Every structure is written in C-alpha cells, then in structure tokens.
Image (cartoon, rainbow, N blue to C red):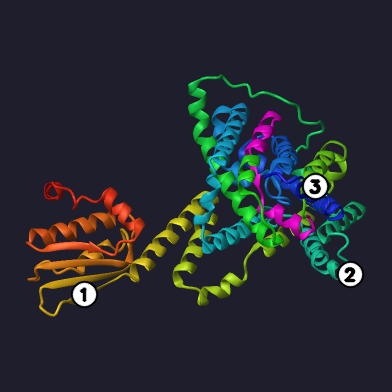
C-alpha cells in the first residue's frame, strides 16, 4: 500500500548525502555507458541516453531507494547480434517489448522466485560481479601511458585515506576532482573520458521505433526481449536484495519489477537501449552516502547536465580516476570472508558458490550462472533431505503383522529407498505402513506407495496405510490408484 510519508522521506530524508553521491555516480556512469554502447554495437549516445532516462524514471516508480539503474553490460551483451543483423530500430523495439514483459512479470508476482536463490548463490553472484567489474577495468590498465599507474595509485590513496580526514564529502568525488585538476594543469598523457567516444550535445528526443508492425518483426525481437527482460529482472532483484542488506532496509520487489519495465519502455522512446540495476554503481551510491530516491534521480540529472552543458569539462576527466572508483567498488563488493568460509561451510555450499562464480565469469551471463547455482542448490538440498529418511520395521508377537514405521520426507529422491525397505516375500498376513512421522510430497512418492501396496496385495497380504497427515492424505487420495477397483490392471499396464 502506498505510504505518502514514507515516499516523502525517501526523497528528502538525506538531501546532502544524496546530492553528493548522485554526482559521484553520474561521473562513474559516463565511461560505463559508453563502453556498454560499444558492446551493443550502437553509438555512445544510445547508452548515455538510456542511463539518463532509466535512472530518472526508476527514481519515481522503482521499489528500492538508492539503487542505481542504467544501461548495463548484462543487457548490452544480449543485443549485439540484433543490432548487427537488423539495426538500432529493432533494438529499440526489443527494449519496449522487454519492458512490457517485465511489467507482466511484476503483475504476476514473479519476483517471488527469488526465494529459491540460496545464500551460496547470492555470495557467488556478488563475487562474480566483483570480478567482472575489475575485469572491465583491464583495458584501461594494459597498454596505456605509464602515467596512468601513478595517477591510479594516487586516486586509490585519496579514496581510502581521505575519509580519515572528513566524511562530509565522498572520497571518490574528491579523487575525481583532484586528478582532473592535476591532469589538466600538468598536461599528463593519460586516457580521458572524451577519448572513449563522442558525447551527445543535445537532449534526448521523443521518438517511435521505425519498424514494420508485423508478426515477422515480433518473432525477430521476441527472443532478445525475453532474454533482456529475464536477465534485467534477475540482476535488479538480486542487486535490490544486496542493497537491502547493505542499508539494513527493505524494499518492494514487485514494485521494482514494475518500475524496471516502465523505465525500459521510456528509455526506448527516447532512443536508449535496455538496462537494469547496477550493483557496481549502486555500491558507489551507498558507499558515498546515498540512501534515497533523490540520489538516483540526481545521478540521471547530473549525467544529463554533464553531457549537454558541461561536455567539454567531462571530456578531460582522466580515466585512472574513474578506474580507481570502480576498483574500490570491486574490492568492496567482493565477499572476502567467503574465501575463509570455504573451509568452514559444507562442501556442497562452497561448490554452489564457486560454480556460480565460474559460470558467471566464464559466460559473462548472470542468468546462466545463477541458474546453475539454483539448480545445484536444489540437487544438493534434495540429496540432503533424502539422507535423513528412514523406515523402521516391527513384527507382532504372533509373527502375523508387520509394521513399517516411515520417518522423514517421502519424495522423488527417497522413493527408491522407501521401496527397498519392504520385504515382499515375508510370510505375514497383514502389513501396516505407518506414515505418522512422514510427509508425502509428490507424484513419485504416491506412485511408490501404490506400488508397495499393490505388490503386497499380489502376495495375498492385507495392507493398510495409517497416520497420514491431512496434506499427505489429500495428495494420496487425489493421485493414488491403489484404492481404485482396477488398480491392479492400471499398475500392470
């Protein structure tokens, strides 16, 4: 339910901190937006316009204050072949469709699937992103003028030492200003923002993608739109969860899903590519003191002003300053304790974490890495639960009644163990399968019960079930066949 007072606090509860952190984020967004445009195969202005529009729109309609959304590598890498084969206009159309799919996902509450992402997968996701953020800086560290390295060291020193003097001004902003002034005054030979690509000099204009409205066009853009929508939501929701933990606050994941969809649709209508939440920039924002929606809005607003009115100043910012900021984010993002936990945590958890890191870094695709992690978590969980399953046997004093006491969770992974516990050749007149301390979960377990009951009946043994809880009784009654008149025929077939 919408709360006006809370919404007002999210906008104006931290004005100074949000204003300063938004500026730091805007400066760091420039080279990334340009780089992501290059990845997607479009002009730098497409990524820059996207970052402006998405950041501004999401500040109003998103569900996570202080989280930065803009053009990202995760979505850019999915668009390259579409642009190469069909051009920019198809990319804009795919972005609109991706936004509509995200709106649908929010309406269907698909954000709830985040409950199936384990802590190990989250840790792997964070560590992989930290590695990718650092790897993205390598082009600016290899084969560059030698002055890059002293300036990088100076920037890192300012970032980590300046807070000991004062925290009134974010140290990353101080580092950017100091290095820019130094590089300009002494004329250092280093790469600058202006060398990464031509910056736009005008405001983005409202437009409609020039594509044919046909089924052929829809089939072309649909696979890309689905991939962008899924990856964008996945990264946004996981980033929201990380920011929740970093700020000790909660956020509305459903609203975030809806907001991401609205922001992407708006981006396309202003000539921008698709985007999503950025863990790196969100980390910069939080580390620089950003806590409210104002920081996200100002990040987009500052970026627009920097591009259009202060483009000449923006162009002279030395890349070592921005690389230092991103290295700081990479170091701060990585969960260093997870390395020590490799020896303390269960091997299965460590394997899930390392697998998530390996697949994300290896494929540069967050969705694949997280999917692998979730699947492995499910497999290990099922295996673990199946190991605490047990069947205890008890024979009556006259030797005529055998009771099988089933304990634990009966599902597909424990169904074979359940069947192996029975002696179908034992000479008894009656068998009782006691399920008081068991729970029936799926069709595999019901099928095992059917098979056991019918095999005993085939041997002329009177068999009955006892102790079923309400949920288990319901699934057995709905799916079971042993109580039906033609059960023997069905099983035989």
Q: Which residues are magenta?
A: 261-290
Our reading of the magenta stretch's main secondary structure is helix
- Disc 3 from disc 2: Cα separation: 32 Å
Q: Earlier in the sequence, mark 2 or mark 1?
A: 2
* Classed neighbour count for the residue bearing mark 2: other residues with Cα under 10 Å, few (<14), some (14–19), many (≥20): few
Q: Which residue is mark 1?
A: 393
In the image, residue 272 lies in the stretch drawn in magenta: yes
Q: Nearer the viewer, residue 20 or 362?
A: 20
> Which dot, 3 or 2, sits closer to the camera?
3
* Observer able to see residue 365: no
Q: Are marks 3 and 2 in contact (CB under 8 Å)?
A: no
Residue drawn at x 20%, y 71% is: 403
| Quadrant containing the N terminus in the rendered view | top right
The x and y percentages for residue 316 are 84, 47
* Observer able to see residue 378: yes
Q: Which residue is mark 2?
A: 165
The x and y percentages for residue 7 are 76, 47
Q: Nearer the viewer, residue 449 or 78?
A: 449
Residue drawn at x 28%, y 57% is: 445
- Disc 3 from disc 1: Cα separation: 65 Å
The x and y percentages for residue 399 are 10, 77
Q: Is residue 446 left or right of residue 337?
A: left
* Classed neighbour count for the residue bearing mark 3: other residues with Cα under 10 Å, few (<14), some (14–19), many (≥20): few
Q: Nearer the viewer, residue 367 or 76?
A: 367
> Which dot, 2 or 1, sits closer to the camera?
1
Q: Are marks 2 and 1 in contact (CB under 8 Å)?
A: no
| Image-quadrant location for residue 453 | bottom left
Residue drawn at x 18%, y 57% is: 451
Q: Which residue is mark 3?
A: 8
Q: Earlier in the sequence, mark 3 or mark 2?
A: 3
Query: What is the secondary structure assignment of the residue under circle 3?
Result: helix
Query: What is the secondary structure assignment of the residue under circle 2?
Result: loop
């Amino acid at each position: 339910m919408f709360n006006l007072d809370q919404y007002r606090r999210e906008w104006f509860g931290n004005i100074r901190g949000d204003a300063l952190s938004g500026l730091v984020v805007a400066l760091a967004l420039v080279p990334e937006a340009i780089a992501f445009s290059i990845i997607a195969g479009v002009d730098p202005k497409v990524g820059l316009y996207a970052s402006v529009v998405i950041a501004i729109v999401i500040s109003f309609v998103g569900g996570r204050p202080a989280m930065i959304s803009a053009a990202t590598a995760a979505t850019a890498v999915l668009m390259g072949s579409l642009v190469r084969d069909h051009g920019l206009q198809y990319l804009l159309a795919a972005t609109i469709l991706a936004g509509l799919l995200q709106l649908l996902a929010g309406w269907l509450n698909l954000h709830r699937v985040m409950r199936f992402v384990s802590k190990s997968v989250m840790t792997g996701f964070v560590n992989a992103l930290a590695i990718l953020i650092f790897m993205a800086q390598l082009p600016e560290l290899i084969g560059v003028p030698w002055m890059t390295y002293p300036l990088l060291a100076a920037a890192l020193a300012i970032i980590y030492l300046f807070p000991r003097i004062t925290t009134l001004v974010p140290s990353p902003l101080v580092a950017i200003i100091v290095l820019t002034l130094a590089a300009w005054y002494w004329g250092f030979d280093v790469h600058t923002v202006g060398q990464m690509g031509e910056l736009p000099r005008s405001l983005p204009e409202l437009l409609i993608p020039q594509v044919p409205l046909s089924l052929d066009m829809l089939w072309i853009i649909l696979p890309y739109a689905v991939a962008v929508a899924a990856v964008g939501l996945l990264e946004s929701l996981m980033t929201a969860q990380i920011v929740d933990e970093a700020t000790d606050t909660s956020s509305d994941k459903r609203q975030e899903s809806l907001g991401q969809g609205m922001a992407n649709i708006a981006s396309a209508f202003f000539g921008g590519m698709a985007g999503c939440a950025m863990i790196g920039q969100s980390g910069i924002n939080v580390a620089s003191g950003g806590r409210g929606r104002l920081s996200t809005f100002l990040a987009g607003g500052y970026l627009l002003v920097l591009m259009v009115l202060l483009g000449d100043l923006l162009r002279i910012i030395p890349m070592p300053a921005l690389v230092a900021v991103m290295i700081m984010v990479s170091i701060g993002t990585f969960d260093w304790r997870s390395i020590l936990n490799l020896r303390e945590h269960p091997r299965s958890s460590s394997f899930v974490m390392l697998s998530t890191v390996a697949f994300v870094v290896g494929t540069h695709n967050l969705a694949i890495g997280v999917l692998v992690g979730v699947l492995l978590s499910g497999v290990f969980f099922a295996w673990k639960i199946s190991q605490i399953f047990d069947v205890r046997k008890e024979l009556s004093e006259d030797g005529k009644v055998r009771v099988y006491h089933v304990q634990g969770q009966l599902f597909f992974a424990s169904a074979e163990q359940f069947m192996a516990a029975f002696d179908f050749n034992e000479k008894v007149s009656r068998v009782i399968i006691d399920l008081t301390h068991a729970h029936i979960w799926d069709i595999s377990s019901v099928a095992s019960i059917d098979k056991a009951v019918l095999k005993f009946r085939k041997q002329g043994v009177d068999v009955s079930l006892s102790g079923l809880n309400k949920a288990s009784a319901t699934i057995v009654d709905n799916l079971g066949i042993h109580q039906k008149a033609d059960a023997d025929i069905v099983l035989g077939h």
